[in-house]
Image (cartoon, grey):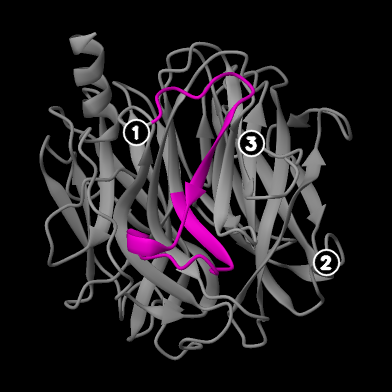
Amino acid sequence: MLVLASLCSVLIGPLTASPAVAGTGPVGGLTPMTPTRILDTRTSSGPVPGGGSVSIRIPGTNGFPYGTQAVVLNITATDGTAAGFLTAYHSGVMAPRTSNVNYGPGQMVANLAIVEVGADGQIAISNTSTGTVQIVVDASAYFAASGPQGLPGSYQAVGPARLLDTRTSSGPIAGGGSVPLRLGGSTGVPANASAVVVNLTVTQPTSFGFITAYPGGSGKPNVSNQNYGIGQTVPNLAVVPVGPDGTVTIANTSSGTVQIIADVVGFFLPGTPTISGAFAGVSPTRLVDTRTNGGPVVNAGTVPVQVVGVNGIPQNASGVWVNLTVTEPTIFGYFMARGYRAPWTFTSNLNFSGGQTIANMAYVPIGADGKIEIQSILASVPRIETSQVIVDVFGYTLA
């Protein structure tokens, strides 16, 4: 048991939680950008050593304007030589006791992150493993000082800080059970926030399944935030509307038990959004499931997803927060999400292995005809390879 606890600490972070701190970070609206690769250590500095970190300058580079306060990044860990995790945070402070991407030896794992920019214009990504790892970072949006400040739907960074760790509190969540994530008080997130941004990590599952995060006090929707197999440790960012009671519910759909960890990175201010870049939550809803409509997607095939006019998303929406899930892939590959008929970019949103079911949150600009599209890129071999695509929506931003 001691060995298991030690391993989980390596994979997820310390069993002692970092305190939640009041929000002193940026408040602003979101601006979509053409997905851009801003770091790939495989072609630049080389693997990041165990205990090492890498810094990335943000304002004035890669299309980020001066005054950028926070960035939306897809962070991928690959070629790790030992189990560990990555932590992304603003420069000028010690690495917080939280995690963004958990990985095992040789795995390729991605996770979305919203990272506040430090006073010197940089962010840092630390490797907690004892081994080396390559890090790839793709940007999809940013929060700028010129955006709405303190208005309904604008973003406020906090922490990062650990809000929930069932390993040290309630214990594992039973199959079919749930746990509330309570906001307000010392969390730095007010109980009347419109939505909370948390990194959810599942660990020690005794059966395969998935977790669903949704507003407290409402019925559980038919969506998923993260899928897992027996014994896996898997993270995923979630942007979850907050219920009237100031809580978010995290449900375990598995027949077995699972431990759940939640690290908060920010929230969206309450009220009716009216300003460009402001966030509005929607009832979590499944938009696409090719298993029941359309069938498997072939290599380089695309899945168009109508978002405007669906689930209350208005004509003046500029982008959507969606959870992407792959299942039944016949070979390894990745998903690329973009505005409908937008130009190809050499970026990725979700990486997977053959036979794997895994999810990742994405912020996707809305393209022509009020649509986004998901493209499945599979390894090229002399036979037909396919994957199934699932898309769940949690909110949108105004143009």
Q: Is residue 265 above or below residue 269?
A: above
Q: Residues within 10 Å of mark 1 (few under 14, many from 20)?
A: many
Give the residue drawn at x 27%, y 23%: 8
The image quarter in which residue 50 lies: top left
Magenta stretch: includes residue 190: yes
Image quadrant in which the C terminus is located: bottom right
Pointer 3 residue:
325
Using the image, tell me which numbered label, if any, was put on residue 26.
Answer: none
Using the image, tell me which numbered label, if any, was put on residue 312.
Answer: 2
Residue 183 as seen in the image, left or right of residue 387? left
Q: Is residue 211 above or below residue 331?
A: below
Using the image, tell me which numbered label, if any, was put on residue 102.
Answer: 1
Distance (Cα) linking label 1 and label 3: 17 Å
Residue 134: x, y in percent? 26, 38
Residue 357 seen in this snapshot: no
Residue 247 seen in this snapshot: yes
Give the residue drawn at x 51%, y 80%: 29
Q: If you read the primary sequence from the N terminus, does the residue marked by circle 1 or circle 2 appear first? A: 1
Check disc 3 and give the amino acid type.
Answer: Thr
Give the residue drawn at x 84%, y 68%: 369
Q: Residues within 10 Å of mark 2 (few under 14, many from 20)?
A: few
Q: If you read the primary sequence from the N terminus, does the residue marked by circle 2 or circle 3 appear first? A: 2
Residue 49: x, y in percent? 12, 37
The magenta segment: 170-198
